[in-house]
Amino acid sequence: MKYTQLGRTGLKVSRLVLGTMNFGPQTDEADSHTIMDSALDAGINYFDTANVYGWGENKGRTEEIVGSWFAQGGDRREKTVLATKVYGSMSREGETWPNEDRLSALNIRRAVEASLKRLGTDYIDIYQFHHIDRLTPFEEIWQAVDVLIQQGKILYAGSSNFPGYKIAQANEVATRRGSTYGLVSEQCLYNLYERRAEMEVIPAAQEYGLGVIPWSPLHGGLLGGVIRKEATSGRRASGRTAEALTDPVVRARIQAYEDLLDKHGLEPGETALAWLLTRPGVTGPIVGPRTSGQLNGALRALELELGEELLASLDEIFPGPGPSPEAFAW
């Protein structure tokens, strides 16, 4: 396994991040434990979850599965850099009550305590804001975070789905307050197909010393060899991927992508992950395996070396937007 620093911190993390969103809804507890054991054995030390994972009536279930894995001992918790998130409502359907969502100091305090209980741990390494809160000032958010850091309940704060200007605003307010760290990481939608983060989110993260953690590195399966699977095994895409492929322009781009990789003898999903590992500012993409086999495929991406010619060809198929303001001004 290869490791790197998380942004400007001294924290050393693996270049692949294990996403747990499927644990519970699609992968049962026993198989989830097996995947986490395999990830740790492979050297992945950065695990990501969220309080709402499990979804619907099962919100919190994913954190409970991670917690039951920690409870098995064997230094599982000590070896893991644990990240979870706060923002979404934890109210059950029909039981909505004020202050059970968003980023008020009250909800942050309550949400941390609930996550700690479900995870069976006394601290969270990286506590992340799952979305911007347009109603809560950063002064209030940092007041809550600073208290939690002083109490030893969280070590760092991160963001997810923040635009570039909110990353800047958050860290400028933290600096003015004399807060402990400010944001140290940003999880954003970023992959070969969806590159808008290159305009402002990633430059802001680099400017303020945040590690970039891309989510949906295969863009919901679109970059995972979907057309090839249709042809060889009859496995048809579903959901958003199937809908995207009905657009002839999108289908032509994905076909060109898969044809290029066939020429080089490469697997699409592994190449999409390997491409992210070449991008400036990227700490490591989140992989969310439903099975151990999918985890093994992700691990192979770490060994891929993508040459300049191939990278240039990928840019031709999936051109980035370019830096701002040139991308939209000139």
Image (cartoon, rainbow, N blue to C red):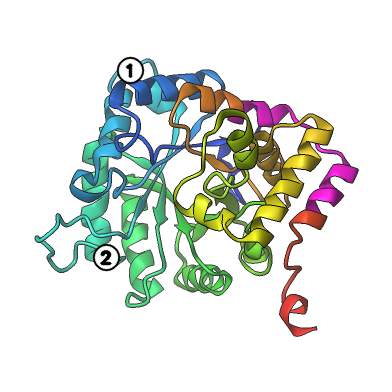
The answer to whether residue 68 is visible is yes
Quarter of the picture containing the C terminus is bottom right
Q: Which mark is residue 105?
A: 2
Q: With 95 as the anchor, is 221 left or right in this view?
A: right
In which image quadrant can residue 324 be found?
bottom right
Residue 139: x and y, percent?
38, 73
Question: Could you tell me how far apart the alpha carbons at marks 2 and 1 are, in whole angstroms?
Answer: 33 Å
Q: Secondary structure at mark 1?
A: loop
Quarter of the picture containing the N terminus is top right
* Of pointers 2 and 1, the one earlier in the residue sequence: 1
Find the magenta span and give its range.
Answer: 298-315
Q: Residue furthest left?
A: 95
Q: Which mark is residue 73?
A: 1
Q: Secondary structure at mark 2?
A: helix
Residue 298: x and y, percent?
59, 31
- Is residue 295 part of the magenta span, yes or no? no
Residue 71: x and y, percent?
28, 22
